Amino acid sequence: MNIKKENTLVFWLFLAPVLLAFAVVIVVPFFMGVFYSFTNWSSSAKADGGLRFIGLENYIESFKDPAFAHSFGVTIIYTIFNMVFINFVAFALALLVTSKIKLRKIYRVGFFVPNLIGGLILGYIWQFLFNNALPSLGKTVPALAGLANPENLLLAKPASAIAALIIVGTWQYAGYIMMIYIAAIENVPAELHEAAMIDGASPMERLRAITLPMAAQAFTVTMFLTLVQSFKQFDVNVSLTSGGPSTMFQGVPVLGTELLALNIYNTAFLSNFLAMGQARAVVFFLVLAVIALVQVAVNKKKELEL
Amino acid sequence: MNRIKVGKIIAELATLGLFLAFLFPFFLVLINSAKTAFEVTQYPLVMPKNWGTLFKNIATIWTSGNIQYPASLVSSSIITSVSLLAISLLSSQAAWALVRTKTKTSNVIFFIFVAAMVIPFQIVMFPLLSWLRTITGITGLRLLRTYAGMILCYVGFGVSLSIFMYHGFIKSIPVELEEAATIDGCSRAQIFYKIIFPVLSPIHATVLVLNGIWIWNDFLLPLLVLGKGNAIQTIPLAVSNFAGAFVKQWDLILTAILLAMIPVVICFLLAQKYIVKGMVAGSIK
């Protein structure tokens, strides 16, 4: 056997397993999914062979549905606040644990730990904290008596329940993002700081003139990472609020804290509108694809500037 | 000089305070796992009266037919370890084939893997279920509610990022290393398994960590492929099933959560260095 033939054979043999798994799990379902979103696909429409092409109807109906519009809005609000809080907290934590304080190695580990536990489990823990521990604190500390009032439970009202989701989301991801900032901050050459100190720069001035610009590269990474992760949030949503409590929107009752991923799931499995859930998933994908394209463009521009 | 000292003390105290606040929810789980149902609802914030209750609760969860904790631990371990082995072996050999074969086909395949990283699970999850059923209908191979199907899914969803990471690293390995082996009479396949695969250790670590944390904690994919309450359950599935069935029985739910966290914490303490490094490396890619 000549070398060229052997190389081609090894190429395909080495790729075959991943190509097969990738095709079965992603490529085929992806195109099926796009196709089904234009049909009346449901568990019954498939069984009796009555699958029909209905054009954009699933999309039009989705955008007319107040629950979907509300979910979209809530997801945008959640994503923006989550991004800001996570990055702010993470950067502050990174500054603290890269300063010369004692026990900084242990602190890093502590801040990072929530990120290792699944979102589902984290959501249950915080449900207990919000629904049981905080009211109990209200009963014991007179100054915080308001916490004991069932009406003041964070998870009882949509707006505060979204705030609760943001608190948990920040707690969950801040430690991870902190690690990325730590890597960026530790990459700043120590000579820069020494030179600035000799010139009499205060810690604040050094932060503004040295650390921040040097860490700017990390900001693009962390911003997009937290943007995408927040937009896709599902697990914490399920276990912390299950989308509730309900609220009125455009004259109909809708779930107050149902993020998009949960809305897609519920549309298909709770309401049994499989094709409509699929259409919403396509919209969800398009948003993420646009974000990814922007990210690529931003990175390209940065590379050119360097 | 004094101002700097005061600043340092403030930074120390602030970090300590934040550290305790970050870990407080876990502390809450621990102390309330050592209480009776009544104590949990009445006094969630005080220390437990009798730590012996902790072991009583653990025993209850361990033997409870509703959560099936030991069986779930075994299932989660099988699914995670086999998927990780398959992902690291299959995607490293694929990445090597892609790097060392400079053809148009190879470039296109690599581009498709990279582009697929944008595809969210939500767009494939509904058709995936009906399509796996179709495959079972044609081949007789059961994929839903089985280890085979679950692991196949993790390999399919995991390879894109893994190939991308291996690809970047293999590009930096000098070809001369392989040429020397060819002269010594190694075949192409031998070159990969004997020479390249061991050199990839740092990327293996990153790939194992990133995929391991994802697979162990994943909830939605097992929920769809394995379903709730069937023979094979992962730990997140079992916990959510249990919490749904025993609403407000916080003494047991929190104990179940404590038990679910223990394997992760042990792994983390053992492999802390690799985990932190791996996750940071994974984010920057």
Image (tube, rainbow, N blue to C red):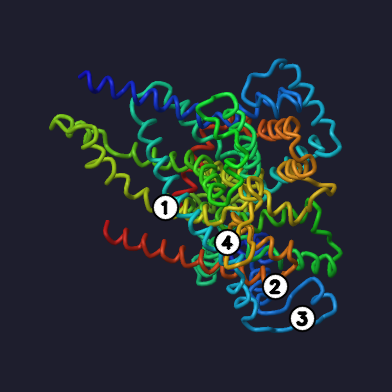
Residue B25 x %, y %: 58, 32
- Between circles 2 and 1, the one closer to the viewer is 2
Is residue A188 in view?
yes
Secondary element type, mark 3: loop
Give the alpha-carbon distance from disc 2 to disc 3, as whole Å. Answer: 11 Å
Compared across the picture, whether B7 is left or right of B278 comes to: left
Residue A243 x %, y %: 64, 53
At 61% from the left edge and 53% from the top edge, which residue is drawn?
A: A234
Compared across the picture, whether B62 is left or right of B94 comes to: right
Q: Which residue is mark 1?
A: A223
Q: Same subunit under labels 2 and 3?
A: yes
Query: On what subunit does the disc labeled 1 rest?
Result: A
Q: Earlier in the sequence, mark 2 or mark 3?
A: 3
Q: Which mark is residue A275?
A: 2
At 34% from the left edge and 24% from the top edge, which residue is drawn?
A: B10
Secondary element type, mark 4: helix
- Between circles 4 and 3, the one closer to the viewer is 4
Residue B251, compared with residue B92, is above or below; it is above
**What kind of residue is marked 1?**
Met
Q: Which residue is mark 4?
A: A71
Residue B52, compared with residue B213, is above or below; it is above
Q: Which mark is residue A51?
A: 3
Give the alpha-carbon distance from disc 2 to disc 1, as whole Å. Answer: 33 Å
Q: Earlier in the sequence, mark 2 or mark 1?
A: 1
